[in-house]
Amino acid sequence: MRHVLTAALFAAAAPAAAQQSADFPASASYIIQLTGSQYSSGLGEYLVPPLDKAFRKTGMRYEGGPGADYAATVETGSDVGRWYGTGEGRQWLYERFVTVGLSPADMDIEPEGKLSPAFSVTVTLVTPNEDRVDELDCLVALATRELAARYQPRGQVRVKGDGCARKE
């Protein structure tokens, strides 16, 4: 019985230990880099706080200027919506996405005006309202956790964000 309990405790602890990739630079510093349009539109006011909060939970240190090891980026968007379901259950829904990226700070992550981070995670969610801030915050946090868990120096991962759907 003691061995079963010990094994159960190790199994319960395993996901916590596996929350970050061995390649994730947990002790490195980061800056948050916005695109010109994100900054000028005021979107940064909605993107920076949840992104900073999520990255601090990974163990990385915010640098706030030149000298950071990595640049964190976030991009959001939505399709124009479409009908889902049939009959009485038919509903107009949007597919919203959040992409969180991490790149060496000296890398040009916006060649030709398009964000191209070295590694990124895109989380998608089908929702009736593509502008909900609570869903945005959740998607940013989820994308950052997945980025830390699946990190590799280069690549792109897609995950579903169904857990971030609005709560009725």
Image: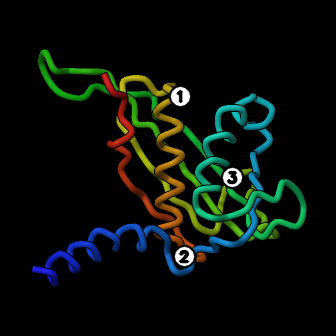
The residue that label 3 is drawn on is 114
Mark 3 packing: few (<14 Cα in 10 Å), some, or many (20+)? Answer: few
Kind of residue at badge 2: Gln
Q: Is label 1 or label 2 in front?
A: 1
Taking the image as shown, residue 60 lies to the left or right of residue 62, namely left
Q: Quadrant of residue 82?
A: top left
Q: Is label 2 or label 3 in front?
A: 2
Residue name at image x 52 percent, y 80 percent: 22
Q: Quadrant of residue 26?
A: bottom right
Question: Against 7, is 166 above or below?
Answer: above
Residues under numbered marks 1 and 2 in contact, where contact means CB atoms less than 8 Å apart:
no
Asked which secondary structure carries label 3, the reply is loop
Residues under numbered marks 3 and 1 in contact, where contact means CB atoms less than 8 Å apart:
no
Mark before the other along the chain sequence, 1 or 2: 1
Kind of residue at badge 3: Lys
* C-alpha span from label 1 to label 2: 29 Å
Please identify the residue farthest to the left as the structure is shown: 1
The residue that label 2 is drawn on is 152
Q: Which mark is residue 133?
A: 1
Kind of residue at badge 1: Val
Residue name at image x 58 percent, y 74 percent: 24
Please identify the residue farthest to the front as the structure is shown: 2
Quarter the C terminus occupies: top left
* C-alpha span from label 3 to label 1: 24 Å
Mark 1 packing: few (<14 Cα in 10 Å), some, or many (20+)? Answer: few
* C-alpha span from label 2 to label 3: 21 Å
Q: Quadrant of residue 16?
A: bottom left
Return the x and y of residue 59 as percentages of the image width and height. 63, 64
Return the x and y of residue 58 as percentages of the image width and height. 58, 62
Q: Is label 3 or label 1 in front?
A: 1
Can residue 111 be seen by looking at this rendering? Answer: no
